[in-house]
Amino acid sequence: MATPPRPERLTGVTAECLVARGFEGVLLDQFGVLHDGRTPYPGAVDAVRAMAEAGMRIVIVSNSSRRSAGALAKIAKMGFREDWFVGVVTSGELTYRHLRERPAEGPWRGLGDRAVWFTWGERGAISLEGTGVTAVGLDVDAATFILAHGTEAMGRWEEGGESELVDKDVGEMVEVLRRLGRERGGAMPMVVANPDFVTVDATQLRPMPGMLGREYAKAGGEVVLMGKPAPVIYEAAMEMLGGVDPSRVVAIGDSLEHDVAGAGASGVASLFVSGGIHAEETATGRPGEARVDEDAVARLCGEMGVTPTFLVDYLA
């Protein structure tokens, strides 16, 4: 059995090393790469500044279920200047646009307008204003589709009204999805506005809507992913890069199943940051501590069937 190829190990992410390899564009993940959800990683601000000063075109590509507008302002508070980036695209932004515009391609025109809505509670519910969607709360039998923005609450909402949220944990949400899968025979589509399974939150990993999508698919349901690794978000990001050839683009992220797999399917190179959500599995220490176990990375890549082009501990 052939040994799978290993990624090229980089000791750091410098603008010089990327330019030397012919890259002009960067698709840059946020959580687990730039910051831990609250604080920037040591060296990350300097790395992004150097890329921008070297003339690289940088687009933030995030599986956040929130819209794009606030993303740059949030990371600007952490020291990342907004003018270092040519744009930002979030899976939440793409979900909003598709719900509002209802393109002919895919399931959009047949979704209906009444949704079982999983959203955020403590973190703040995602706005449905302008989408034409009514959220049915716990009255799941009245719904025509499922919309997953978050993993903290189920919500009721109508245009012009205020959200009414009921806190639910992931286990309770999964039970709702299994029931719908059984009773609807998989005929009710589920739109996942954040395909991540988990994300970093300081020193913890928190469940994300992609985990709900995975469970609904197991129950036989149709799942529509609006972010990485689905092509839709890479197509939007490449448009922002303004004609940069895919062979000259590198995607930087910390999820093998989302960032690395999505980049490979879209024909761009990938740089895997092992110190994000896979830090424990790859034995990557905290910044300044013990470094990644390359054998552990190779095993993990083999299990998931993906191989990044490059490997680094942290974006620094």
Image (cartoon, rainbow, N blue to C red):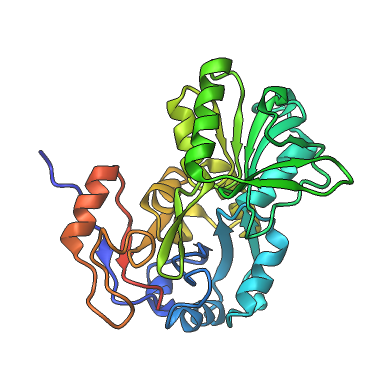
Position of the C terminus, as image quadrant, is bottom left
195 left or right of 71 in image: left
Q: Residue furthest left?
A: 1
Q: Position of residue 118 (x, y in %)?
A: 62, 42
The residue lying furthest to the right in this view is 160
Q: Residue at x 64, y 47 (%)?
A: 119
Visible in this render: residue 84? no
Residue 113 location in percent, x, y? 77, 30
Give 164 or 59, whichever is nearer the viewer. Answer: 164
The image position of residue 251, as x and y in percent, is 46, 59
Q: Nearer the viewer, residue 47 or 245?
A: 47
Q: Residue at x 56, y 58 (%)?
A: 61
- For the point 70% across and 52% down, the residue is 126
The relative height of residue 43 versus residue 217 in the rendered view (above or below) is: below
Corner quadrant of residue 241: bottom right
**How many circles with numbers are drawn on the protein?**
0
- Residue 99 in the image: x percent, y percent? 74, 38
Could you tell me if residue 64 is visible in this image?
yes
Q: Residue 110 is drawn in which quadrant?
A: top right
The image shows residue 161, relative to residue 178, as above or below, that is below
Depth check, front residue: 242 or 260: 260
Quadrant location, the N terminus: top left
Residue that appears at 54% across and 38% down = 173
